[in-house]
Amino acid sequence: MTTTTMRFGRPPTRVRGVRRVLHESAYALTSFLISLAAFVVVVSVLVAGAGLSVLGIGLALMALAVLMSRGFAVAERVRLRGMLGKDAPGPRYLRAREDDGVVRRVLTPLRDPQSWLDVVWSVVGLFTGTVAATLVVAWWAAVGGGLTYWYWERFLPMNEGDDTLASLIGLGEGREPEIMLNTGFGIFALVTLPWVIRAAALTHAGPARALLCGRAELQGRVDRAEGSRDAARVAESASLRRLERDIHDGPQQRLVRLAMDLGRARRQVHRDPERAGQLIEDARRQATETVAELRSLSRGIAPPLLVDRGLVAAVEEMAQGCPVPATVRADVPGELPPHVETAAYFVVAEALTNVAKHSGAGQAEVHVSMSGMGLVVEVSDDGVGGAHEGKGLGLAGLARRIEAVEGELTVSSPIGGPTLVRACVPVDRR
């Protein structure tokens, strides 16, 4: 099976149900232990370094503390991904240049903003970890103690006339009201356990993601923007080169021949009027074909139907003109951003072109719809399969075009078929 995919990272798998409660409980419980270790190690070394900052070793100790906080930050990101299933990207830390001296290399961590955010997390994490662990321990204790109170209460000493919680709130005296009350507490704690455990985990995970992953997410958006810009430049350059080649090989050659035919017709108009008429007719046919070819090339720049009537009408026209029978299912809003419509149009155009030329398919289907991710375009066929980017410039150029709009292109085409070309284009409605 051949699968070509362009995407910006897959989110970690999230567990559900009882496993989720257990994972979040383990995360909250271990948060206190890890945060306590981070606080003691990082803060003690950092304070010692600050106290000795008048000496050279002080700054080195501070740099060591920053590096140790970086290690705890890496561990926390792993815990966020592995135990909570959250997307926790790691940032790019500042690195020393090759021509930096020894002192500048040693002090490089002190110049990195993210490293100081890691230090802040070593302090903040102790407080959030303490709250999270306390909530988890208290609620699990309430569940276990309340639901088993009926068994172990017999081992508790109780004399007649002793005040109990049940008697104080008017439920009665003796062991039975006390058992009913504690069992009720246990049932309440069990019912509310998933929400309390989730709140405890988020108490620690929320600040962790903000401090440890916020800068990384910003760096990722910048990288995607730069990648999209570069992809747009490459796609535009390739489109211009292809357009220049198509004009040179097609309309330009026809216009040269048209000029030659008209020149011959002018020379033959008096000597051989019949021959001149035939040359003029050939010239007229050449002009008609040239106009049609120029109109076809213009569709590759700005399809008139797409501009005038929208994406659905343009896709339906392409499907009607496809040599392979193609059905269209489209459910999209009436107005979409122009770059989204253009990207979707060219996905369908390239996919149907490949279906007609290479697939050997008996039928094809185009599905255009909206989802939470954006505009989704799927083109499938029942052909022989085996399509991938390496077979030509079409899919490779299409991948660059989709990347230019920060989208995702997936081509699934096992040998023997079927083939599915799927593109997801983000839609910003602001």
Image: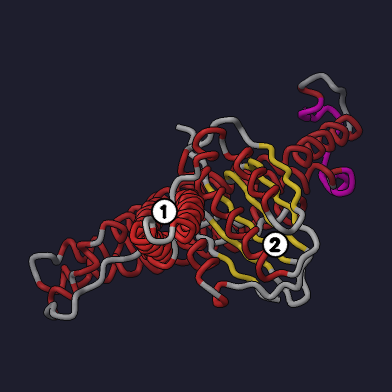
Lateral position of residue 110 relative to residue 15, left or right: left
Q: Which residues are magenta?
A: 150-166
Given the image, on which type of amino acid does mark 2 rest?
Leu
Q: Is residue 143 magenta?
A: no
Q: Position of residue 348 (x, y in %)?
A: 61, 53
Which of 152 and 416 lies nearest the eye of the viewer?
416
Which of 228 and 271 lies nearest the eye of the viewer?
271
Question: Which residue occupies 70% across, 62% down?
Answer: 420
Sequence-wise first label, 2 or 1: 1
Q: For mark 1, give the secondary structure.
A: helix
Which of 198 and 173 lies nearest the eye of the viewer?
198
Question: Which residue occupies 26% across, 66% down?
Answer: 94
Q: Position of residue 22 (x, y in %)?
A: 70, 56
**Residue with the mark numbered 1:** 217
Q: Position of residue 253 (x, y in %)?
A: 40, 65
Q: For mark 2, give the secondary structure.
A: strand
Q: Position of residue 29 (x, y in %)?
A: 59, 56
Question: Which residue occupies 53% across, 40% down?
Answer: 306
Given the image, on which type of amino acid does mark 1 rest?
Glu
